[in-house]
Amino acid sequence: MTELPVPAGPADVTVEWMNDALGSSVSLNGAQVVSVEWEQIAVGEGFAGQLARIEIDYAGSSGTSADAPSSLIGKFASAHAETRELLAMAGGYEREVRFYSDLAADCGLPTPRCYHAAYDAAAGTCVILLEDLSPAETGDQVAGATIEESRFVVAELARFHARWWNDESLPSRDWMRPSADLGEQIITLFETGLPAFEELAADYPRIGVLVRRAGKVLPMLIGELVERFGKPPYTLVHGDMRLDNLFLPVAEGDRFTVIDWQGATLGAGAADLSYWLALSLTVEVRRAHEDELLRLYHATLVEHGVTDYKFSQLKRDYAGTLLALIPFAVVAATSLDLTSERGQALASAVFTRMDEALADHKAGRLLLIAPWALRASKVRDALSSPFARRSRA
């Protein structure tokens, strides 16, 4: 069979294409797909791509197998040109396809069943056919997570990170490795998007100050990030751990499921944690329970075998990864389509929470001392190397 084309959107999904796509993952017992109907869903919420619910009808004398889906969710590259280009440049579409193909079945967090996943780098298109989890619904990031929900998520996140802690198979996966020109691309996007971002964040003057300060040290910080790729401690991170990407159990028997793995990569576990606490909790809930949740995360890591990572290091990493929200916010706010009512409400909630979290953790001071802190870190690494220890002996 020739390689299936990758549809640009749900309108390009035909009966013939669906037969071939499902035929590789589901036993249809001789039946055939005879119709597909789709409706767009999550309008104003699926900022990185197009989402559609696809209804499928079959025909055939032997009938279909029990696991042939009558409905599934199709994920496609964004129809918004700037968003599509950003995600393609950052490797987001390819990463999610490779995650579902290579890791999802045993990743340590529950994911929807994947029936088909493909990416066309030349065209910038992707398609992922996923289990339809309706009538379950994702959380609402604008409303914010409760402390009970957050305790649950933080514990699950720690177990997931412990599963992949310093796993030697991760750095060898080419789709996780940053491209040679990623740093230059991020800097260009940051500088290009800065004027529009400052207009969007006009009501948050503290963020404006931090963004301008971050711009001065961004090349150095990105260079350090690329240089440290694959150096412990690292783990598999989700990269977009927020309430809108979680199906949380509400009643007994409900499933917990994590979606949207376009940010999956190798990195610091604290990055997922800071992203969750700073952006998915209201300011009041985070301030009241931040230390408790950090301690829960660390204790769960230790419980699951991570014994070489001190709580003091977690606190430093947590504060440091909060700084990554600054360039991320500039690039995302000016490249993603946030024009819908939902998008504007989410942007307002995120700016408010990020503003307060960065102020609470003295991000301005951290940015001022970042160059000296990185130099000191390099000295410590050099002095702790096996060669340096032998030289001092």
Image (cartoon, helix red, strand yellow):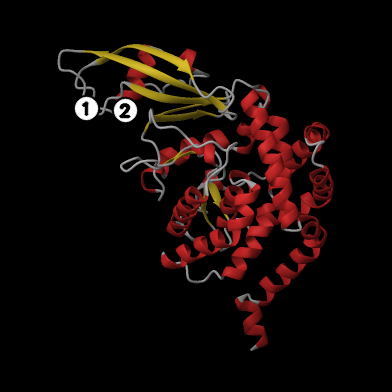
Q: Quadrant of the C terminus?
A: bottom right
Looking at the image, is 135 positioned above or below residue 91? above
The residue under label 2 is which amino acid type? Ser
Task: Residue 13: tell me if it is visible.
Answer: no
Observer-side mark, 2 or 1, equals: 1
What type is the residue that disc 1 sits on?
Answer: Ala
Whichever of callouts 2 and 1 sits on the residue coming sooner in the sequence is 2
Which residue sits at x=48%, y=66%? 299
Residue 175 position in % (x across, y down): 53, 43
Q: Secondary structure at mark 2?
A: loop
In this rendering, the count of numbered labels is 2
Q: Position of residue 23 (x, y in %)?
A: 30, 24
Residue positioned 48% across, 13% down in the render:
11
Q: Is 351 left, or right, of 96 in this rendering?
A: right
Label 1 crowd bin: few (<14), some (14–19), many (20+), radius 10 Å:
few
Disc number placed over residue 240 in the picture, else none: none
Furthest residue to the bottom? 393
The residue at which mark 2 appears reads as 24
Circle 1 residue? 66
Q: Position of residue 317 (x, y in %)?
A: 63, 61
Q: Is residue 277 left or right of residue 25?
A: right
